[in-house]
Image (cartoon, rainbow, N blue to C red):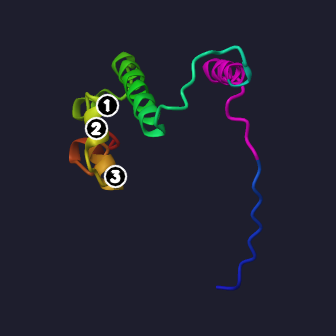
Amino acid sequence: MGKTNWKIQLCWVNAHVGIQENELTITITKEAATNTDIIESYKEVPKSVVISELGEISVEKWQRKWDQTTKEEITKEYFPIVADRLNMKINLTHSFISMVMRHGNARSYLHRFNP
């Protein structure tokens, strides 16, 4: 193999454009950050508490969406509770994902493709 010359270019991607909730969040955050009329001060709240509370809120929202989705029913059988799954130490290998998604080398799966 010969020497490969790589050219790497980094660019900014505006991932929030078109996602209403993200755009609204950014707008509200900017307004709150620049509003000098706000009396409350959260300077005394440790960063770890804020991160923990935001994490809990995120998991609760994720669980609501997980419960409502009609997709990934097979995966939901293995991991019905998002918080429990996040606390598991799982090595997400290709084999593990294939097993959970029932896309392994099982004869019943391969049989579907035989004429």
Q: Which residue is labeled 2 in the image?
A: 85
Residues under labels 3 and 2: Cα distance?
A: 12 Å
Earlier-in-chain disc, 3 versus 1: 1
- Of the residues tagged 3 and 2, which is closer to the observer? 2
Q: Which residue is labeled 1 in the image?
A: 82
Name the residue nearer the viewer: 108 or 47.
Answer: 47
Q: Amino acid at mark 2?
A: Arg
Q: Amino acid at mark 1?
A: Val
Residue 107 rendering spot, x and y as whole percentages:
22, 47
Name the residue nearer the viewer: 83 or 39.
Answer: 39
Which residue is pictured at 57% across the width and 18% down the height? 40
Q: Which quadrant: the C terminus?
A: top left
Is residue 28 inside the magenta stretch? yes
Q: Is residue 78 above or below residue 63?
A: below
Magenta stretch, main secondary structure class: helix
Query: Which of the labelled discs sits on residue 92, or is there none?
Result: 3
Is residue 13 inside the magenta stretch? yes
Earlier-in-chain disc, 3 versus 2: 2
Q: Is residue 78 above or below residue 105?
A: above
Instruction: Please give the range of residues in magenta.
Output: 12-32
- Is the residue under label 2 in contact with that under label 1 (CB below 8 Å)? yes
Residue 17 rendering spot, x and y as whole percentages:
72, 27
> Secondary structure under badge 3?
loop
Label 2: how many Cα within 10 Å (few below 14, some 14–19, many 20+)? few
> Secondary structure under badge 1?
helix
Label 3: how many Cα within 10 Å (few below 14, some 14–19, many 20+)? few
Name the residue nearer the viewer: 60 or 108.
Answer: 60
Q: Which quadrant: the N terminus?
A: bottom right
Label 1: how many Cα within 10 Å (few below 14, some 14–19, many 20+)? some
Residues under labels 1 and 2: Cα distance?
A: 5 Å
